[in-house]
Image: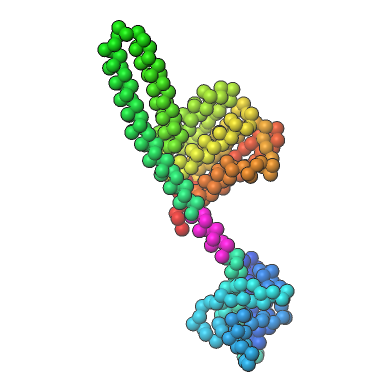
């Protein structure tokens, strides 16, 4: 015998399930129907469950329809169109099970479960799209890593060899002032190119991220930005950060990179505070500035930078909250699992 708490628990499940649950008699009279079933079909207790399009088509014009699922108990489910109270038909996935025999009438009562196929299909498509976005982000980061390595180890080393060759040439032409001046100009231009290559490689994929971890890489990024924007103070506080999963590190770095880019370009801020905390289960990150803020609804292209931040957080199975008020700055609050979620 079930306890009151168990009955209450089952009652809550019945009322809150997203699928429609209908209890009906053999003559298809509705004995019970949960809120999801009512919202989906418009049916009510005391009414009758119509036959689906599959059963009516099977019956044709010469026979009375009969329920295919009740007649074929080995069939677990069926995809068909079901008429609603409003007169239209909806695509549903449905299953039927005999659950009770009424001793007074000797009639079997059945539970009909309906699932909105269109909504279910959209959920599946959203899950597939999510996996595709994750795969694209990962492929992009791998390509960035490869290109950065080639720039550093290939082009960078070649340019360094040219620089050494110029020094060697210079030692043989000490008496030719014009040639010395020309070599100095070439060396200066070469140094600019080497610096550019180094910066490009860093933008693609900082080597320090793989070698040293997230915190040193972010601090180096902050140092670079503050050299370019000396009137912007950037503070970073961390707690228990250490090393994270590589996917977590690169995505958090990209998020901070994108956020700082937006702040320096649009926010007119003088102070940015970054908090990074890791415990046994999650990583918590807050990026707060004292800039002019914004109204997200008025941002052109819906703020692609913000969307990219949200996409990266979503791929890590986390949550992202962006709070901004005009003249009061912007705060980005992010919570993600410590370990990267599986591709389920």
Specify the farthest residue to the top: 175
**Residue sitting at 30 percent across and 25 percent down?**
161
Q: Is residue 128 magenta?
A: yes
- 106 or 130, nearer to the observer: 130
- 163 or 103, nearer to the observer: 163
Q: Is residue 12 above or below residue 306?
A: below
Q: Is residue 18 above or below residue 181?
A: below
Relative to 196, 276 lies left or right = right
Q: Is residue 213 above or below residue 70?
A: above
Highlighted magenta segment, given as a residue range: 121-131
Whether residue 6 is visible to the viewer of this picture, yes or no, is: no
Q: Is residue 45 above or below residue 143?
A: below
Pinpoint residue 72: horizontal percent, then vertical percent. Answer: 52, 85
The image's colour scheme reads: rainbow
- 283 or 172, nearer to the observer: 172
Specify the farthest residue to the bottom: 62
Relative to 135, 96 lies left or right = right
Pinpoint residue 165: horizontal percent, then vertical percent. Answer: 29, 21
**Residue sitting at 58 percent across and 62 percent down?**
122
In this rendering, the count of numbered labels is 0
For the stretch drawn in magenta, the main secondary structure is helix
Q: Quadrant of residue 183?
A: top left
Whether residue 189 is visible to the viewer of this picture, yes or no, is: yes
Pinpoint residue 334: horizontal percent, then vertical percent. Answer: 56, 43
Q: Which part of the image, by quadrant, shows the N terminus?
A: bottom right
Relative to 64, 279 lies left or right = left
**Residue sitting at 63 percent across and 44 percent down?**
301
**Residue sitting at 31 percent across and 19 percent down?**
166
- 24 or 160, nearer to the observer: 160
Pinpoint residue 61: horizontal percent, then vertical percent. Answer: 64, 90
Q: Quadrant of residue 180?
A: top left
Q: Is residue 124 magenta?
A: yes
């Amino acid at each position: 015998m079930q306890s009151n708490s168990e009955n209450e628990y089952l009652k809550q499940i019945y009322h809150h399930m997203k699928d429609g649950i209908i209890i009906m008699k053999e003559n298809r009279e509705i004995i019970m129907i949960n809120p999801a079933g009512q919202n989906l079909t418009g049916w009510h207790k005391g009414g009758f469950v119509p036959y689906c399009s599959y059963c009516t088509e099977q019956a044709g014009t010469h026979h009375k329809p009969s329920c295919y699922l009740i007649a074929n108990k080995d069939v677990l489910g069926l995809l068909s169109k079901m008429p609603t109270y409003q007169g239209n038909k909806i695509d549903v996935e449905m299953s039927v099970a005999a659950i009770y025999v009424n001793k007074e009438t000797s009639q079997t009562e059945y539970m009909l479960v309906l699932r909105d196929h269109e909504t279910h299909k959209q959920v599946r498509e959203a899950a597939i799209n999510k996996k595709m976005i994750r795969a694209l982000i990962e492929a992009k980061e791998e390509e960035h890593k490869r290109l950065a390595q080639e720039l550093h180890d290939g082009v960078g080393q070649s340019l360094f060899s040219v620089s050494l060759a110029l020094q060697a040439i210079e030692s043989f032409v000490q008496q030719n002032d014009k040639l010395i001046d020309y070599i100095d100009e070439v060396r200066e231009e070469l140094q600019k190119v080497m610096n550019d290559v180094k910066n490009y490689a860093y933008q693609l994929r900082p080597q320090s991220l793989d070698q040293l971890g997230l915190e040193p890489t972010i601090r180096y990024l902050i140092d670079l930005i503050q050299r370019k924007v000396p009137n912007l103070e950037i503070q970073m506080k961390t707690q228990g950060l250490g090393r994270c999963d590589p996917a977590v590190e690169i995505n958090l770095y990209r998020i901070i990179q994108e956020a700082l880019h937006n702040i320096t370009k649009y926010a007119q801020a003088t102070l940015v505070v970054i908090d990074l905390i890791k415990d046994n289960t999650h990583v918590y990150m807050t990026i707060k500035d004292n800039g002019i803020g914004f109204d997200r609804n008025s941002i052109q292209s819906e703020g692609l930078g913000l969307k990219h931040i949200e996409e990266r957080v979503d791929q890590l199975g986390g949550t992202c909250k962006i709070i901004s008020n005009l003249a009061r700055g912007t705060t980005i609050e992010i919570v993600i699992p410590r370990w990267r979620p599986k591709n389920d």
